[in-house]
Image (spheres, rainbow, N blue to C red):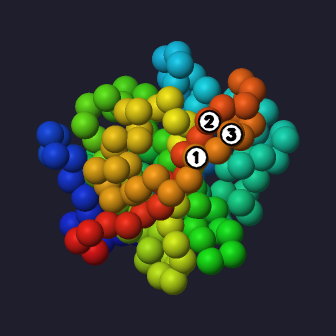
């Protein structure tokens, strides 16, 4: 399930991004990522805890079916994607490595993942959820071709929060 080798390039950095299966070594790395507050809401539990609980990519079946690694030129882990199936919709989950955040990389990253979702399920609508206060991510998703379709409150690890559902509607696809 690897993307076209031409892949997507960061606008300000000459790094190609490609989609690959999420391996255990990638899962371990993701669990070690530490985002600064207030983005620390996106930190994962330890790898040992995820394996023990069988949650998300700690479940080998779910990891293989729904998760992918986004790798750079040297096959270094840049981020991850989840392709969560809902009837007629692929809901994306995505995370960029913390040291790469706020560098103008988010829109190319999100677009690559949306295009991969379209390859995997061409008839599905593609959407994602983002916390409304995360204006940095909202702007990146808008530049990638997503538009806010709905806003609602939902539970998070830190209580209820306002969330946007954004739908992929690129003008140049």
> Quadrant of the rendered structure where residue 170 is?
bottom left
Q: Decide: is 113 above or below 80.
A: below
Is 40 displayed left or right of 48 in the figure?
Answer: left
Residue to which mark 3 is pinned: 153
Q: Which mark is residue 162?
A: 2
As helix, strand or loop, the secondary structure at mark 2 comes to: strand
Q: Are marks 3 and 1 in contact (CB under 8 Å)?
A: no
Q: Residue at x 41, y 38 (%)?
A: 137
Q: Are marks 2 and 3 in contact (CB under 8 Å)?
A: yes
Q: Are marks 2 and 1 in contact (CB under 8 Å)?
A: yes
As helix, strand or loop, the secondary structure at mark 3 comes to: strand
Residue to which mark 1 is pinned: 151
Farthest-out residue, right: 53
Which circle's residue, 2 or 3, is located before the other in the chain? 3
Can you give x and y, in whole percent of width and height, for residue 12 in the image? 14, 40
Is 47 displayed left or right of 83 in the figure?
Answer: right
């Amino acid at each position: 399930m690897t993307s076209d080798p031409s892949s997507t390039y960061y606008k300000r950095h000459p790094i190609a991004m490609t989609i690959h299966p999420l391996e255990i070594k990638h899962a371990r790395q993701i669990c070690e990522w530490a985002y600064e507050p207030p983005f620390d809401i996106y930190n994962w539990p330890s790898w040992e805890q995820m394996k023990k609980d069988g949650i998300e990519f700690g479940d080998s079946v779910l990891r293989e079916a729904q998760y992918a690694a986004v790798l750079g030129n040297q096959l270094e882990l840049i981020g991850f994607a989840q392709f969560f199936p809902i009837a007629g919709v692929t809901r994306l989950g995505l995370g960029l490595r913390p040291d790469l955040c706020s560098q103008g990389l988010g829109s190319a990253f999100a677009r690559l993942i949306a295009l991969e979702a379209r390859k995997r399920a061409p008839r599905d609508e593609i959407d994602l959820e983002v916390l409304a206060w995360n204006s940095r991510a909202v702007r990146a998703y808008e530049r990638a071709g997503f538009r806010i379709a709905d806003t609602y409150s939902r539970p998070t690890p830190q209580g209820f929060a306002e969330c946007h559902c954004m739908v992929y509607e690129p003008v140049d696809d």
